[in-house]
Amino acid sequence: MSATLSIDGLHLGYDGAAGLHTVVEDFSLALDAGDIGCLLGPSGCGKSTVLRAIAGFEPVRAGRIRLGGVTLSSPEVQLPPERRRVGMMFQEYALFPHLDAAHNVAFGLRRLPRAKQQRRVAAMLALVGLPDAGQRHPHQLSGGQQQRIALARALAPEPALLLLDEPFSNLDGATRERLTTEVREILKAAGQTAVLVTHNEAEARAMADRIGVMHEGRLSAWDTPAQD
């Protein structure tokens, strides 16, 4: 079940030769369950670092990250990534080339009985519009189809939150525009809370319910996208 995301006063950084190097400073936002948020900004502004902190791959210097009221990260708490119920989808879809689409989708369901796995895989393939692609391997799929299989795999374990790190950057312009709309529809159909990171303003406006503009490690806005 999707959950509300709350980030309060987040500071992220690392120790360097000259002392502490701050990457993200005084970062706060709230995202309702079932909504899609977007962090928009250029490379190096800290948006992917925030995503990694939510996932549990970056320690928190100050502040707190909560999901569904449960503290995931703070200076005192660092819940392991596998216990966060947070799914991730990256620029590289990272599909296993030796597995067909169905087994790729089932990868995170290994603890379920086989019959439940098969039902969940079938439901996810149908959700992403590829119900008959289960026996096809990644090299037999287009870039857009691979992206949808990667999304099905990320959604299959029913994460409370899904993180998407520049998921459309490897696609051509026409495919990217089409899939931006399709992925939003899929996430909305699943009732999935999600955070997208991108440097593409059009992509952010097409995907997100809330957009945060990042600059040099700070969030300068967190608003609903303006309508044309």
Image: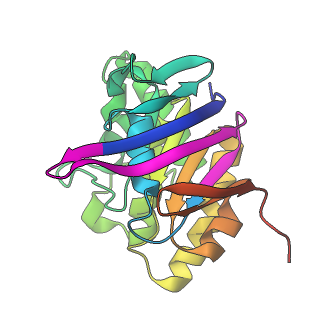
Is residue 227 within the magenta segment? no
List x then y, in percent, for residue 101.
Answer: 34, 49
Q: Is residue 133 visible?
A: no
Find the residue positioned furthest to the front: 18
Q: Is residue 95 left or right of residue 152?
A: left
List x then y, in percent, for residue 120.
Answer: 49, 30
**Segment colored magenta:** 14-38
Dominant secondary-structure state across the stretch colored magenta: strand
Residue beneath the point at 26% across and 44% down: 14
Find the residue positioned furthest to the left: 17
Residue beneath the point at 37% across and 15% down: 113
Does 99 appear above or below 177? above
For the N terminus, the image quarter is: top right
Residue beneath the point at 47% across and 63% down: 216
Q: Quadrant of residue 33?
A: top right
Question: Which of 60/103 is in front?
Answer: 60
Q: Is residue 225 visible?
A: yes
Find the residue positioned furthest to the bottom: 173
List x then y, in percent, for residue 207.
Answer: 66, 61
Question: Which of 224/182 is in front?
Answer: 224
Does 16 appear above or below 32? below
List x then y, in percent, for residue 3.
Answer: 64, 27
For the C terminus, the image quarter is: bottom right
Q: Quadrant of residue 60?
A: top left
Does 85 appear above or below 17? above
Question: Which of 7/112 is in front?
Answer: 7
